[in-house]
Image (cartoon, helix red, strand yellow):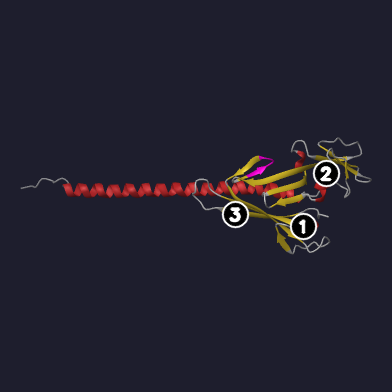
Amino acid sequence: MKHRAMGFGLIEIMISLLLGLLIVAGVIQIFISAKNTYLSQNASAVMQEDARFILTKMAQEIRMVGMFGCLATVKDSSANSDFAAAQMTPVRWDNATSKLTLVTADVGNNGGVPTWTVVSDCKSGATARTGTAIPAATELAFPIRQLVYQFANKQLLLGGAVIVNNVNDFSVMFGTANTASDTTVTAYTATPASMATVRSVRLTLELQDATGRVKNQKFSVMTALRNRLY
């Protein structure tokens, strides 16, 4: 006598459902972990891109600090007679207000109206005038811009406009030589005794992730000044 085929019992069905749920839970956990990893990597990449953008920009500007044309002596004919003072201290850091001021050649001449323009024939004289100045046929014009960066309220500002958000800290250190005639950097300080001894600037930027997925990241760049500051 043949026995009929028997179906699954309740216990077998429950075990199958349990195994299925375990597999689904494992797949969901893998998906969640992969998503969290992607979000963390994306947040880190955004922070790196923000830091790369602003530090590269500032480094380019710092390299041109003190570059006021083809002659060392420039006559101040600015409207407020303020170019001479800016020329003496073309890079300044106020540690109390976290404010960095740069007086730099207008890189690329694409920054709109410059703060001053130095007009020179590169032979007999150079004159600084406020705003845009049209050179004569035998002269060259060197646009000069005063840029003010400030760290405040977790933001890095340029002229009052926000350029980077989620900034946890921003600091500036100056590489200085022993004397105005030396070229070798021997010390780093936030408050140099004399700007004539400054040879390089080190910027440090600490960014934080607004979502809290990754830890704060520090980025630093050191830039040598193109011209020594006398």
Give the alpha-carbon distance from disc 3 to disc 1, as whole Å: 24 Å
Name the secondary structure under disc 1: strand
The answer to whether any part of residue 218 appears in the image is yes
Place of residue 55 in the rendered image (x, y in percent of width and height, measured from the top left):
66, 49
147 or 44, nearer to the observer: 147
Nearest to viewer (mark 1 / mark 2): 2
Q: Disc 3 designates what residue?
A: 218
Give the dominant element type of the magenta stretch: helix, strand or loop.
strand
The answer to whether any part of residue 68 appears in the image is no
Label ID, residue 198: 1
230 or 39, nearer to the observer: 230
Give the alpha-carbon distance from disc 3 to disc 2, as whole Å: 35 Å
Q: Is disc 3 in contact with disc 1, using a CB cutoff of under 8 Å?
A: no
The verdict on residue 26 being magenta is no
Q: Earlier in the sequence, mark 1 or mark 2?
A: 2
Residue type at mark 1? Val
Nearest to viewer (mark 3 / mark 1): 1
Name the secondary structure under disc 3: strand
Q: Is disc 3 in contact with disc 2, using a CB cutoff of under 8 Å?
A: no
